[in-house]
Each structure stands twice: as structure tokens, then as C-alpha cells.
Image (cartoon, rainbow, N blue to C red):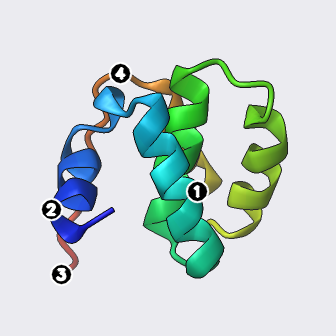
Amino acid sequence: MNISDLTYLLNKPETINEKQTIALENVVLQFPYFQSARALHLKGLYNQESFRYNYELKKTAAHTTDRSVLFDFVTSDDFKIFQQEVY
């Protein structure tokens, strides 16, 4: 997986297919603390209704700082996060 593929999936996570999920799994194996890759891999498993989803959810949740954002990302079809301005 190259950087342009990863960037595309970050912008359109609902399009992750089985081949990309496998590629993301390889990225996670190489870089176990790469939170974005873990979240995308989990989203791919969720989209495919994989039996491995629950197992990977536990591992991804352990690497995530805000689990509510992770839940929204994985379960929504059109995820958007709004950044709040800090004054």
C-alpha cells in the first residue's frame, strides 16, 4: 500500500474492499502503533462483516485515545469529525 492509497482510504473509508483490508493488515503488522491504519483496517473488517471484527476491535480500542470517535468512524457511512477552535 502506498501513501496515495492510504490517503484515499482516509478520505473515503466506506470504499475499503477485501484486498485493501489485507494490505492494511500488513501495514498494521509493520507499524503496530499506526492508529489510522488500525482504524481503517477495522473499518474494512466491519464493512465485510468479518468474524475477526470483534477481536480486532479490542486491540484497536486499546490503541485509541477516544473510543467514541472510533465507534462513530467504524459504524457510520459518512463520518465527519468537526474540530473545535480553542480560544
Of the two numbered discs 1 and 4 on the same chain, state the one appearing first in sequence: 1
Do labels 1 and 3 touch, CB within 8 Å? no
Of the two numbered discs 4 and 3 on the same chain, state the one appearing first in sequence: 4
What is the CA distance from the residue labelled 1 to the residue labelled 3?
Answer: 39 Å
Three-letter amino acid code at disc 2?
A: Ser
Do labels 1 and 2 touch, CB within 8 Å? no
Q: Residue at x 30, y 28 (%)?
A: 15
What is the CA distance from the residue labelled 4 to the residue labelled 3?
Answer: 32 Å
Could you tell me which secondary element the residue under label 2 belongs to?
helix
Q: What residue would you read off at disc 1?
A: 25
Q: What residue would you read off at disc 4?
A: 77
Q: What residue would you read off at disc 3?
A: 87
Q: Is 44 positioned to the left or the right of 13 in the image?
A: right
Q: Nearer the viewer, mark 1 or mark 3?
A: 1
Q: What residue would you read off at disc 2?
A: 4
Residue 78 is at least partly visible in this image: yes
Within 10 angstroms of label 2, few (less than 14), some, or many (20 or more) residues?
A: few
